[in-house]
Amino acid sequence: MIDPLLTTDDVATRLGIPVPEVRRLVRRRELACIQLSPRRRRFTEKHLADFLQRKTVDIVEKKSVLKGYNGPPKRVEKRKNSTQINHVAEVRKLCH
């Protein structure tokens, strides 16, 4: 038995995303489809299931990836050397 074919609108509704996003996913080859013509695409339940399976992240796996992560690097302020400080002082004297 052949699965019923879904339209781009159907897929967008099921995934909760805008229709243009569905088209982008197809163009990027992240979401498979049946191309009936250059503008007509149809999708099966298997296409959606495969897409969702690839996008599903296991929480245990994610924690192991973050193990040892201490956040973004700290910003280190660059110190001015004495020559730079002297030039700044001279410029200030000239301006006042």
Image: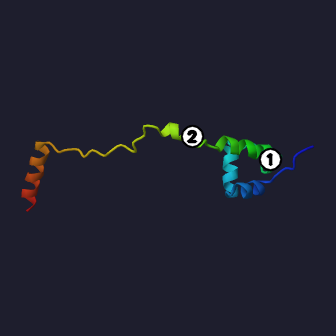
**Which dot marks residue 60?**
2
User: Under tag 2, what secondary structure?
Assistant: helix
Residue type, numbered disc 1? Glu
Of the two numbered discs 1 and 2 on the same chain, state the one appearing first in sequence: 1
Residue type, numbered disc 2? Val
Q: Residue at x 66, y 53 (%)?
A: 21
Q: Residue furthest front?
A: 60
The residue lying toward the viewer, choosing from 1 and 66, is 66
Q: Residue furthest bottom?
A: 96
- Disc 1 crowd, CA 10 A, few/some/many (<14, 14-19, 20+): few
**Which dot marks residue 45?**
1
Where in the figure is residue 60, as x and y percent of width and height?
A: 57, 40
User: Under tag 1, what secondary structure?
Assistant: helix
Q: Residue at x 52, y 41 (%)?
A: 63
Is 61 positioned to the left or the right of 84 in the image?
A: right
Where in the figure is residue 80, as x and y percent of width and height?
A: 17, 45
